[in-house]
Image (cartoon, rainbow, N blue to C red):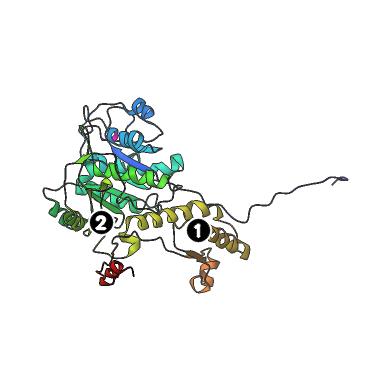
Amino acid sequence: MGYDRSVEVVEKPTSLLPPVRTGTLVAVVGTAKQGPKNVPRLVFDYSEFADTFGIGGDFDKFTLEEAAEVAFKLEHVSPVVFINVGNPDTDKIDSSAVIGGVDPNTLQKTGLEVIEDIYPKFRLVPSIIIAPKFSKDPSVATAMAAKAGAINGHFKAMAYIDVEVDKYTDAPAYLVNNGLKFPQVKALYGKGISGEKKYHPSTLAAFRKARIDAENDGIPSKTVSNKPLYINDSDVHLGLDQANYLAGQGVTPLYNNANGWVFWGARTAAYPSSTDPKDTFDNVRHMFNFLNNELILTFNQKLDGNITRRFVRTITDSYQVRLNGLSAREDILGGRIAFLEGENPVTDLMDGIIKFHIWFTPPSPARKIEFITEYDPNYWKVLFGN
């Protein structure tokens, strides 16, 4: 090495790792007038959608068009992932095309299976899966729930499904009889109407939720329930007792109250079969999905690093900062991360397996607010100046 006279600066890797934000991305599977089939397309505005998939003016035939209008024209959220399974004018499109599968010879994916390509292609993780109109078919809804529970083997999402029954009282039994009482399912009832247009409830709820989350810095800690929608009518008109009945059975109906037309109820389809808050409140389930996905994306970079004290501290310190930030914002009530000796036997550590334990508590939405009123005769004293 030669003679050296200099001032040098050496950068060291940051010991605290900032989280990789996942946001709220809606993936829509359905039909379009034109465009590529069975490939995910990331779309940022309505004109891009129109150029890619065309505009046919018939939501019943072209279900992706309905989603594009709600996302880009009503809720003003983007981007959205669209998966076109075909044009009903030239192909027979039924539930099997939406469910899709994987060709054993070519490994080509179709339908809901194309969701597996979203992260590898865009490095984005879907938070909500919808299939307007088609999700009223229990076989499609079941496939959506399965996909939402494990995307790429480990990412998690919610499946927002449409429930269409003859009478509102049939809706709870519909979920039970078709095996749809899953925590990753949000079951929605009643079509929204604006002018002459009708929107499926899954479409309205998914993009209303995306807008709520966008206004909360992408953190899904708030429920979609009781937030005003951009509709002026519905094909269902329920009284409070009827809407409460459905909400108490894991079905979220459209309901007209002082806030205008809203979705009424923060429960997932798992309720009341399950009473675990993380599985039965939609915002709490979303938060668990969100932090699950965030942990995977953030700490993927630490795989294959040597397991040392500094390695452990980097992970625990980094994520404790994240939990503290979420607590300060009141997106969670509190949280902590620990590396526990009892959960990390030496045999696991020798084999390269390390476990961290995380506790956190997203706040539950207030489902009942009670005031106690009482007649107080003492106030008659005001007549005598007392």
Q: Is residue 206 left or right of residue 295?
A: left
Q: Label 2, on which residue?
A: 269
Mark 1 or 2, closer to the camera? 1
| Nearer the observer, 339 or 361 | 361
Label 1 – label 2 distance at C-alpha: 30 Å
Residue shown at the point (31%, 26%) measured from the top left:
54
Picture coordinates of residue 31, whole percent (x, y)? 26, 34
Q: Label 1, on which residue?
A: 328
Q: Secondary structure at mark 2?
A: loop
Secondary structure mostly taken by the magenta-highlighted segment of the chain: loop
Which residues, given as a range, are shown in magenta? 60-64
Three-letter amino acid code at disc 2?
Ala
Picture coordinates of residue 126, whole percent (x, y)? 39, 45
Specify which label sits upstream in the sequence, 1 or 2: 2
| Residue 108 quadrant | top left
The answer to whether residue 369 shows anywhere in this view is yes
